[in-house]
Image (cartoon, coloured by chain):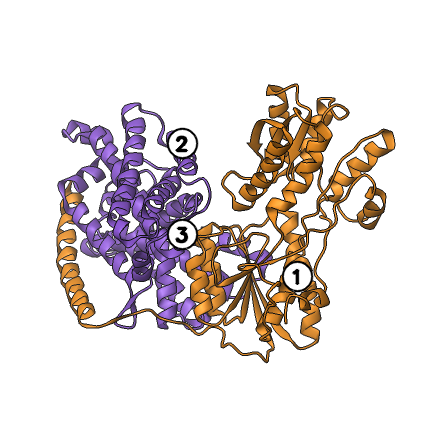
Chain colours: A orange, B purple
Amino acid sequence: MGSTRHRNMLGRRWRGSLALGAAAVAGTLMATACSTPEGGGGTGETEGPFTIGVSNGFIGSEWREQMLSELETAFGEYEAEGIVDQLVVESADVDINGQIQQIRNLIRSDVDAIIVNPNSPTALDQVFAEAAEQGIEIVAIDQAVASEDVVNVVIDQAEWASLSAQWLADEVGEGGRIIAVNGIDGHPANEDRWSGASEVFDAAGVEVVANDYAEWDQNQGQTVTRDLLASNPDVDGVFVQDGMALGAFRALQAEGLVDDVVMTGEARVGYMREWDAQRAEGDYTSIGVPNPPSVSVSALHVVIRMLQGEEFTADGLDGNNAWLPIPETITDDTFDERFAEVSDENDAYAVDHALTPEEADAYFE
Amino acid sequence: MNLLRGTGTRDLPGPVRSLLSVHMPALAVGLLLLVTVTASAILQPGFFSPYGLSASFATFLPLATIAAAQTIIVLGGGIDLSIGTIVTLSSAVSVVLMQGDDARLPLALAAGLATGAACGLFNGLVVAVLRLQPIVATFATSSVFGGVALLVLPTPGGEVSPVLTGTYRMVLAMYVPIPAVLLVVLFLSWRLLRGSRYGQHLYAVGGNAEAAYTSSVPVSRVRVLSYTLGGAVASLAGVALLADAGAGDPTLGTELTLGSIAALVIGGTRLRGGSGGVGGALVGAVVLSLIQGLVFFAGVPTNAREFVYGCVIIAAIALAGLLTARDGSASGASGGTR
């Protein structure tokens, strides 16, 4: 234990000098006033060219890929006009702490505006306030946030879910029994969607016999659906959110239930191929409500107008939400036409829609 | 390191050699800190501005605190994979009680701390008394704590008291952010613990539990307490996260677990236990955070960033490992500077 003694001696010496140092520092600090610093950030100019920052906290989903690539394309058009000069993208799988750091990095990169797909509707409030203090305009996409410093450019997730829920309720009828495959428990978009869907089911007298989560992942969607079907064999329908419908379909297929159990679909090419194949065989019916990745493009149109000093009209902004229209639902009646438009895309492609610049103008005075 | 010890230090006089061996881990992480700070100063605009410092330290503190918590557990020969969810659960409890009201802050903080300590105690009992493998046991309890956090705070929300967020962003004397002061306080508290009888027991149990047992060290009690302390310190990371975020979220902190382990390894703590210290882990956490920022400011293309970040972390851990790796008696001494 010789080394232990050595360590202790060293430790004592360190402690002594450290304590002294700390006392000195503390003394100095007490004597001076406190302050809250502000950084360099945007300068509130309205001339441009503007630098736009993007913070995306979740990757590895094709939807997010599409969101970013469509944004880059639209940015290129504004760049050609000389309105913007640089797109700084922060995109990685991060937790909330990591996304706070992403946004701070953008602030320190002197961006004029930030487009954020937030990992939390509330826990980024502080860092949004930091950015806003420095004159940076912030828009949130995909997921609305509470902060008053942010304009949400989003679809109404509750309404989005209620569209397919209503269709399913009509299909199974009053007293129908369904299972639900949702996204991530506690995730705000998931909660909004499920509250919208639940309301519809309650009103229609549809019984939700089981509800589980598959993290918006096709493979997990398949597993979860299979397990739910195994424990609840006598259901009439499946409510499944987007990103998991193809998986849910495969589970139904494996159990031989495609013709007996009706399910909500999704406006993504992989599922639509199956839908197409089933239509060729018989009277398969489904629904797909698009959740467009190009909300990023809509947000770019909006934020550039904010940077140019335009003011929202009274109708343009509801609280801090600039609601986007939910794109037209794909139904059995419109399927052939809609599928033809996207059938060349890969399976992961989501049916898309963005505001045109003219439609964006309508939000402003 | 064998190379260095084999040829480089063999001819050196004894005292120099022992000095080198004592300071090597500190040297390694110190070098990493120097490199990352220099690179940040060059690459990041306004790194040393008041806002730059305040933003940086606000980001360092949660990771540094959870790294400190993990280090206490690892030193005692354990590991805690549930530590991120302990942060989540304790922050959820705090924010639910806080309700954005300054008057309720003390109650909320106390409840958060108690929650963290209780989670740690639970882990400690499972590991030390039921004798389950820590890595599996705490992996299981992480689901338990994460699940309870969702029950406490089903959806994101809950306002943090303005005093807490305000204080966290304050800067003293123009250039000293409050989180930096808290980092120093954390280190000094560790020095107190380290110097105490319990601190010695912790190293003894982590280094060689059987030998410690025969020297009548209460091994199980030391282990249980290390988990409990770790849980309590982890709850402080939850407070820092709440202060930084301004609101609660049922996923806050969950992903910090692996970061805490990476930070302590960079900081020269051995995962087998009994060697290393919190000081190194704190610096390791700072290095880890700085590297993350550097990858961004160095202009690495978005899609390559994760890859580059991972490679740099491996390099940092390898460097720390090369300069730290040693066996037998020298390993005891390597904890000396912490």
Identify which residue, A184 or B72, lies in the foreground: A184
Please tell me whether mark 1 sits on a helix, a strand or a loop.
helix
Q: Chain for mark 2?
A: B
Quarter of the image with the N terminus of chain A in it: top left
Cα separation, mark 1 vs mark 2, equals 41 Å
Q: Name the residue located 25 percent from the left edge and 45 percent from the top edge.
A: B107
Cα separation, mark 2 vs mark 3, equals 23 Å
Q: Name the residue located 74 percent from the left edge and 22 percent from the top edge.
A: A256
Cα separation, mark 1 vs mark 3, equals 28 Å
Q: Position of residue A293 (x, y in %)?
A: 66, 53
Q: Position of residue B291 (x, y in %)?
A: 44, 59
Please tell me whether mark 3 sits on a helix, a strand or a loop.
strand
Q: At label 1, which amino acid type do we have?
A: Ser
Q: At label 2, which amino acid type do we have?
A: Val
Q: At label 3, which amino acid type do we have?
A: Ala
Mark 1 on the same chain as mark 2: no
Q: Position of residue B223 (x, y in %)?
A: 25, 33
Q: Name the residue located 53 percent from the left edge and 50 percent from the top edge.
A: A93
Q: Which residue is mark 2?
A: B144
Q: Which residue is mark 1?
A: A298
User: Visible in this render: residue A350?
Assistant: yes
Q: Which residue is mark 3?
A: B247
Q: Position of residue B252 (x, y in %)?
A: 42, 47
Mark 1 on the same chain as mark 3: no
Identify which residue, A84 or B227, lies in the foreground: A84
Please tell me whether mark 2 sits on a helix, a strand or a loop.
helix
- Left or right of B241 on screen, residue B43: right
Q: Nearer the viewer, mark 2 or mark 3?
A: 3
N-terminal of the pair, mark 2 or mark 3, is: 2
